[in-house]
Image: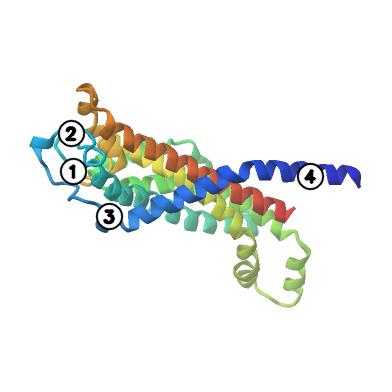
Amino acid sequence: MSVALTRRRGLAKVTASRAPLQLACLGLVALVVAAALLAPWLAPYDPNDVDLSGALAGPSADHLLGADAAGRDTLSRLLLGARTSLLGPLGVVAFSTVAGVLVGVAAGWRGGWLDSVLSRSTELVFAFPGMLLAILIVSVYGEGLLAPVIALAIAYLPYVSRLTRSLVLAERERPYISAYKVQGHSALQICLRHVLPNIAPIVLAQSTINFGYALMDLAGLSFLGLGVPVLTPDWGRMVFDGQTAIQHGYPLSAVLPCVLIVLTVVAFNVVGERWADRFARRAA
């Protein structure tokens, strides 16, 4: 009994020490989402309003965070860029989660040849780098947000399907499954009403972590000129556009979106890992 108590106290200390970081990351996520939703009302200027007389202007009363090489207000582009920077990862996560859960449930519940076929198929997708797949699709269909979102969603699908499959395999062995089968419930009813609600929290936690990685990948594609169109505000595109300013000694228009990308990715990862740890402890 004393050993168990010692472990619980140790776990409580670790949890308490991580609480400030987790709360800060959750607050940052909420702040970024709120900024993206309210961007049209918060932005002081049109993000594409070119003013060459104010090119590379430093922070001032007119431009709180300065202006880029074309004289566009940096704050306005950061606010509006949050929309595209979050919308793309949201599409990736939504598609990969829905498709991955369907594949994982089918493989884990049915087993047999279906499990073998689906598992081998996801392994093939694992062997193909997601960024390379996105570059290939964008090179065929041209710039825009849809092509890289679809490509990365396919690349992220195996992560969700593998996790779902392992959770379903464990859930299928629980006594309540046999009880519902004896009562005459169909496999579809059991999966929809009981299995999916039980595994949903862990899957959603993993999807939150995937959101951060998808944001980073899409920002990288935009930096390479393969993401959103040229005039669309986007954090990755802002880093690309800010290269000229860095060469002239004005790094702010490129550094600020870099900092936002890093902080947002870290925040989503910390929040997702916190949820995953919490749900894992509950399941144990």
State the separation of the CA atoms marked 1 and 4: 53 Å
Task: Identify which amino acid the numbered label 3 is placed on.
Answer: Leu
For the image, the number of numbered tags is 4
| Mark 4: few/some/many CA within 10 Å (<14, 14-19, 20+) | few
Element carrying mark 3: helix
Please identify the residue farthest to the right as the structure is shown: 1
Residue 13 image point, x, y percent: 72, 42
| Residue underneath mark 2 | 57
Element carrying mark 1: loop
**Can see residue 119?**
no
| Residue underneath mark 1 | 62
Task: Identify which amino acid the numbered label 1 is placed on.
Answer: Asp
Viewer-proximal residue among 229 and 102: 229
Residue drawn at x 58%, y 48% is: 162
State the separation of the CA atoms marked 1 and 2: 10 Å
Looking at the image, is mark 1 or mark 3 earlier in the sequence? 3
Looking at the image, is mark 2 or mark 4 earlier in the sequence? 4
| Residue underneath mark 4 | 9
Residue drawn at x 71%, y 55% is: 283
**Can see residue 59?**
yes
| Mark 1: few/some/many CA within 10 Å (<14, 14-19, 20+) | some
Residue drawn at x 44%, y 53% is: 30
Residue drawn at x 73%, y 66% is: 177
Residue 192 image point, x, y percent: 59, 69
- Name above or below for residue 273 compared with residue 244: below
Looking at the image, is mark 1 or mark 4 earlier in the sequence? 4
Element carrying mark 4: helix
Looking at the image, is mark 3 or mark 2 earlier in the sequence? 3
| Residue underneath mark 3 | 42
Task: Identify which amino acid the numbered label 4 is placed on.
Answer: Arg
